[in-house]
Amino acid sequence: MADAGAVAGSPLTDWISLGVLTSFVPRDAVDEAIEATGKNARRSDTTIPPQVAAYFVMALALFADDDYEAVARRLAATLDDLDVVGPRWEPTSGGLTKARQRLGSAPLAELFCQVAGPVADLDTVGAFLGRWRLMSIDGLEWDVPASRENIAAFGLPAGRDGAPGALPKVRAVTVSECASHAAVLAALGPASGARPASEQALARTLYHRLTSDWLLLADRNFYSWTDWCTATDTGAALLWRVKAGLRLPPLRALPDGSYLTVLVNPKATGKARDALVAAARAGEPLDPATARYARLIEYDVPDREGDGKHEVIALLTTILDPREATATALAGAYQQRWEHETGNRQLKTYLRGPGKVLRSQHPDTVYQEIWGYLLTHHAISALTCHAATAAGIDPDRIRFLRTVRIIRDRIATDPAFSP
């Protein structure tokens, strides 16, 4: 694995000192997000403007171990350079807390929507399969403080009410670029309590935003007829693992070992289902409201360290022609879904810190804090991806933790640098 200290013939610190990271969350985008969500400063809000609060939230993600005033001191010269604070800016923990509460989560969510996009290009190692950009969808959970407000909003895990140390949880589902690990779409909701937001429900809010040049990878928990149809109708290509119990009638074997199948709306049962399968076997056009052609790829995973399991992986795809992507190529591409786990680990372990609880005592600032983490992670992922692409190496070869440490050290020694 390559050291983040040297990329493309020059130290990564040189990339950072040139302000590459800052360019991914520019001041104009922050202003637009604040304007769009109606969070412009009132006349009374002269001490800490909303733009400062937004950058401060992102900096909290970068310096998870520091208190509010320490983070603010690191940013003082940078914020002055961005022309968003006055010369006598002396923030206190109480003032910063109030500034976060005034700002709320909406501007950070809007800002993420504006700036978070795929960052790999055609020269990035492992970013594409043919004409499709490899993307994946998955979820992760965050522990939040057990304040009265957070428990009321997020609840506690089942069976843990009143248990010592029990913490509310928030779930995030993200669509991320496999090569860079950068999240480009996200949805948040409670992961515990009486009405938790499931991964499937949160994912459902994202499918309509897929684009036609993506190949979306998903684990078997995400498949349903309705969700498959919603995602397919965007024009994106899909490669989803499905559970063994899904009824997938074989229609025709294909030269690469995969076969054509048909997905039938679960509302069609008995003779209605049989008629749709017969029409598919005859190669007739199908009403997409009732049935859709798909392609099934199955392969066996050998025993893993003597676990005695020969697991059969079943992958469904909308790419029906093996000439566009062979079964072997698609099975190999599906392994890139594990890059999402790497991105989640970068967020929760390298940025936040292993086992750490978020800072925020109120539900809206909990969401705000998570959006701050997603924005900061996206910016760092973009930085490392661009550096790796310039060097002609896989972004995985640049150590994320090492990059984070360089950025932290750079800000500490050269404060005229934005988070």
Image: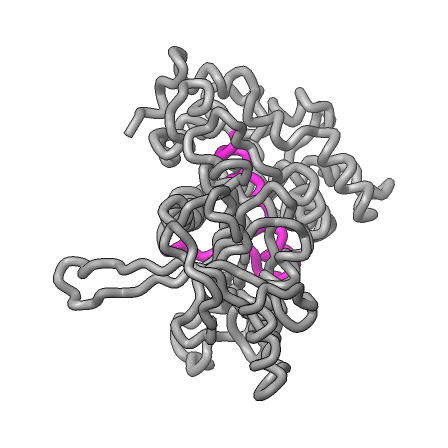
State the image coordinates of residue 194 (x, y, percent, origin top left).
56, 80
Magenta stretch secondary structure, dominant: helix
The C terminus - image quarter: top right
Picture layout, residue 6 above or below residue 63: above
How is the model colour-coded? one colour
Q: Quadrant of residue 152?
A: bottom right
Picture layout, residue 309 above or below residue 131: below
Picture layout, residue 193 above or below residue 174: below
The N terminus - image quarter: top left
Whether residue 61 appears in this view of the structure is: no
Please tell me which residue lies in front, 29 or 240: 240
Q: What are the residue bounds of the magenta stretch?
A: 355-382
State the image coordinates of residue 201 (x, y, percent, origin top left).
60, 68
Residue at the spot x=42%, y=70% of the render?
A: 243
Among all residues in the image, which is located at the extreme top? 9
Residue at the spot x=48%, y=61% of the render?
A: 260
Picture layout, residue 123 above or below residue 379: above
Q: Is residue 79 left or right of residue 169?
A: right
Looking at the rendered structure, the number of numbered marks drawn on it comes to 0
Residue at the spot x=64%, y=45% of the render?
A: 212
Among all residues in the image, which is located at the extreme front? 282
Please tell me which residue lies in front, 135 or 294: 294
Residue 78 in magenta stretch? no
State the image coordinates of residue 249 (x, y, percent, origin top left).
47, 72
Q: Is residue 309 left or right of residue 242?
A: left
Residue at the spot x=67%, y=49% of the render?
A: 109
State the image coordinates of residue 225 (x, y, percent, origin top left).
58, 70
Among all residues in the image, which is located at the extreme bottom? 270
Whether residue 399 appears in this view of the structure is: yes
Please tell me which residue lies in front, 157 or 416: 157
Among all residues in the image, which is located at the extreme left? 306
